[in-house]
Amino acid sequence: MRNEKLVIVLSLFLIFFGFSAILFGYWEALQPRTGPVGNGATLPTLLQILPSILAIVTGILNLAHFVYVRRKAYYKNKDNQENTDQNPS
């Protein structure tokens, strides 16, 4: 039970972290700059966003895999329980 909660929490954290990192990157890039810092907005490149995108994809795939494994185990246990109920020995 504890391991299941950890998988769900870490998956949701990865998804949330990825989206927040991308939003922060764009927000930071669009802040006005004055003085010797530079002129204009330089948006994040694909290579800078790629770790955040991979974190989101990893979180989604991990969560989907967890749901698949749990449903498979649930139906397997349900079938075993029905077989036991029909053939009591």
Image (cartoon, rainbow, N blue to C red):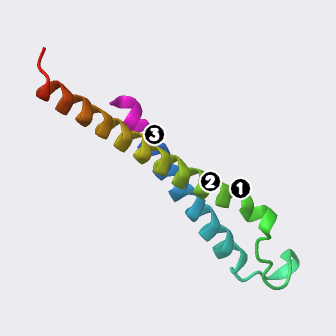
Q: Secondary structure at mark 3?
A: helix
Q: Position of residue 36 (x, y in %)?
A: 88, 77
Q: Residue at x 36, y 30 (%)?
A: 2
Q: Quadrant of residue 56?
A: bottom right
Tell me which segment is drawn in magenta.
1-7
Q: CA distance from mark 3 to mark 1?
A: 20 Å
Which residue is tagged 3?
7
Horizontal side of 89 relative to 28 (left or right) equals left
Which amino acid lies under the numbered mark 1 shown in the image of this protein? Pro
Callouts 2 and 1 close, C-beta under 8 Å: yes
Q: Secondary structure at mark 1?
A: helix
Q: Secondary structure at mark 2?
A: helix
Q: Residue at x 64, y 75 (%)?
A: 27
Sequence order check, earlier mark of 3 and 1: 3
Please tell me how crowded label 2 is: few (under 14), some (14-19), or many (20+) other residues with Cα within 10 Å.
Answer: many
Which amino acid lies under the numbered mark 2 shown in the image of this protein? Ala
Residue positioned most to the top? 89
**Up/down of 85 relative to 78, above or below:** above
Q: Which mark is residue 55?
A: 2
